[in-house]
């Protein structure tokens, strides 16, 4: 098992994967552990950025760019604006539970160890996928040829949801 670990860390891509995976998992754990909403959004943004790094390692540059642009940028900023523009009543903070944090850290490390061990013991089949020169062009071809109807239905669904949110927000103002 130790030779598998040494072989895993002998590649720069594997080290990058390990770092991005740690940031993604750490950001997600911090997001559910923090009590202040702004800190939660920042840790969620760290998770989004580390997922974009994982997409780059998978040679999905377009998906990584969209991840950074939409999720890490727009969604995080929108959440921060929403937090800043709403009124929050001061609530009594919950008492610190150090035992809870210790159990959370032990559970996260145990889960990481189990997943790491399972991945090390698994043999993955070789995939014979065709390599393309331009991922973005291939995504565009699929979106506007084969998947044009689901793509348009999704845009209509998002537009209806946006209009519904505006109607609900107007109704709360009145």
Image (cartoon, rainbow, N blue to C red):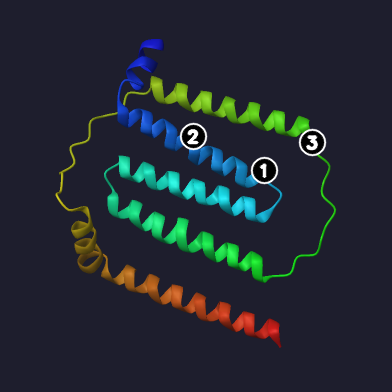
Say whether disc 1 or disc 3 marks the residue closer to the N-terminus: 1
Residue located at (49% from left, 38% from top):
23
Say whether disc 2 or disc 1 marks the residue closer to the N-terminus: 2
Relative to 138, say whether 131 is above or below: above
Residue located at (57% from left, 51% from top):
42
Q: In the picture provided, is 162 more to the left or to the right than 35?
A: left
Q: In the picture provided, is 35 more to the left or to the right than 153?
A: right
Residue 97 image label: 3
**The N terminus lies in which quarter of the figure?**
top left
Residue located at (64% from left, 55% from top):
38
x and y, in percent, of residue 109 in the image: 58, 26
Element carrying mark 2 = helix
Q: How many marks?
A: 3
User: What residue sits right under mark 1 in the picture?
Assistant: 33
Q: In the picture provided, is 124 more to the left or to the right than 38?
A: left
x and y, in percent, of residue 116 in the image: 46, 25
x and y, in percent, of residue 172 in the image: 69, 81
Element carrying mark 1 = helix
Residue located at (58% from left, 25% from top):
110
Q: Distance between the residues labelled 3 and 2?
A: 24 Å
Residue 22 image label: 2
Q: How far apart are marks 1 and 3 (CA)?
A: 11 Å
Q: Nearer the viewer, residue 134 or 87?
A: 87
Element carrying mark 3 = loop
| Residue at the outermost bottom position | 174
């Amino acid at each position: 098992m130790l030779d598998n670990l040494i072989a895993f860390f002998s590649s720069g891509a594997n080290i990058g994967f390990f770092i991005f995976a740690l940031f993604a998992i750490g950001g997600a754990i911090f997001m559910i552990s923090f009590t202040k909403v702004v800190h939660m959004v920042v840790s969620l943004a760290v998770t989004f950025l580390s997922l974009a790094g994982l997409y780059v390692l998978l040679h999905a540059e377009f998906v990584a760019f969209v991840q950074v642009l939409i999720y890490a940028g727009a969604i995080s900023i929108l959440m921060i604006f929403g937090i800043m523009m709403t009124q929050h009543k001061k609530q009594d903070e919950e008492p610190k539970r150090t035992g809870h944090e210790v159990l959370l850290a032990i559970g996260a490390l145990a889960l990481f160890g189990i997943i790491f061990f399972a991945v090390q013991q698994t043999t993955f089949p070789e995939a014979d996928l065709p390599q393309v020169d331009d991922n973005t062009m291939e995504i565009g071809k699929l979106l506007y040829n084969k998947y044009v109807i689901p793509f348009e239905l999704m845009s209509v669904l998002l537009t209806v949801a946006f209009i519904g949110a505006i109607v609900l927000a107007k109704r709360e103002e009145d």
